[in-house]
Amino acid sequence: MPKGISETDVHQAADALVAQGERPTIERIRAHLGTGSPNTVTRWLETWWQRLDERLRAGAPGLAAGNPPADVAALAQQWWEVAVTHAHTVASQALADAHAALQARTDALSASETQIASERLAWAAERAALIHARDLAQRGVSDLEAHLQALGRHLDELQRQHAQVDAEREGLLGQLLAAQAAAQEAAAAANLARTEREQAHRAAEDRWLQEVDRARQEAARQAAIVVQRDKAIERMTSAQADLQERLRVASVATAAAEARANTLQAVRASQPAARAGRTPKPAVATAAARKTKRK
């Protein structure tokens, strides 16, 4: 309640308004006083209306001053009672109007408070939804970064395997060249042995029968050597084909890993707000450097 506003101030303001020929209302009393809350003015205005009848009746005996004639005094008394009744009716109507205005203000205030509470709940729900969406976005960025790091490590592993396959290929090629050289030496030895047998056969026809068995045995041995050579060549050829297939598969896997890494880097680059101020991960920088080195 504002300081300085009392029941007497409200009653005096109401009397002043009545003396000016105006009906005292809440707004007029507040305007007359220049201050005061509507609730305080309403409470003291109600007491003013309640005491108005007593104040009017208390002023009735003064009409008898001067000892007027009895009929005049009776007529004056009747007019006074009519005036008091009318004033009481007007006061009751004004009090009802003041109550109605106060109830309307109270209803409007309640509706405003209900609307404010509803808006606060809506704002709180929207704020919670925004916080949840922010948390989800942050977790999504963290998951993408972790996945990108895992892909970088996987790319490094594929590059290591690719280098290992290259080393194995070089070793297999060396073995293949050695096997080919051995096969050529075996073929040369077989040709030399066959030449020697032919010369020995022509030089010693008398020993032909004895040498037939030896020649057959030698032919069998040479045939076994040829078979072994052919098998060795076949194994080397199969190993070379298998090595080439493994190299092809490794190349495809490396290309796929690089494509996935490039895709993730593009996704990460399309989210500048989520990744602003962050330095590139070492694994991704190393993978990019290795990619540039291979090119």
Image (cartoon, rainbow, N blue to C red):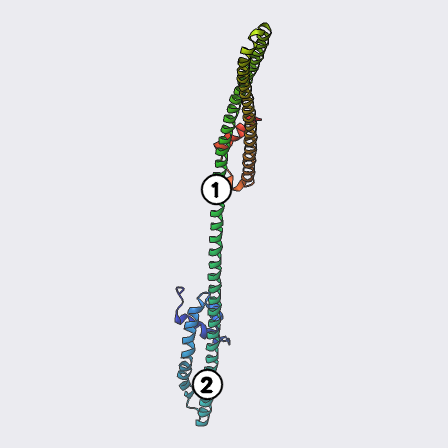
**Quadrant showing the N terminus:** bottom left
- Nearest the viewer among 28 and 186 is 186
SS at mark 2 in the image: helix
Residue 280 visible? The answer is no
Q: Residues within 10 Å of mark 2 (few under 14, many from 20)?
A: few
SS at mark 1 in the image: helix
Of tags 2 and 1, which is closer to the observer? Answer: 1
Q: Position of residue 127 (x, y in %)?
A: 48, 53
- Determine whether, in the image, residue 246 is placed left or right of residue 11: right
Q: Which residue does the numbered mark 1 point to in the structure image?
A: 143
Q: Residue 267's quadrant in the figure?
A: top right
Number of labelled discs? 2
Q: Which mark is residue 251?
A: none
Q: Give the mark nearest the N terminus, 2 or 1.
A: 2
Under mark 2, the amino acid is Thr
- Nearest the viewer among 180 and 174 is 180
Above or below: residue 73 compared with residue 165: below
Q: Which residue does the numbered mark 2 point to in the structure image?
A: 85
Above or below: residue 269 compared with residue 230: below
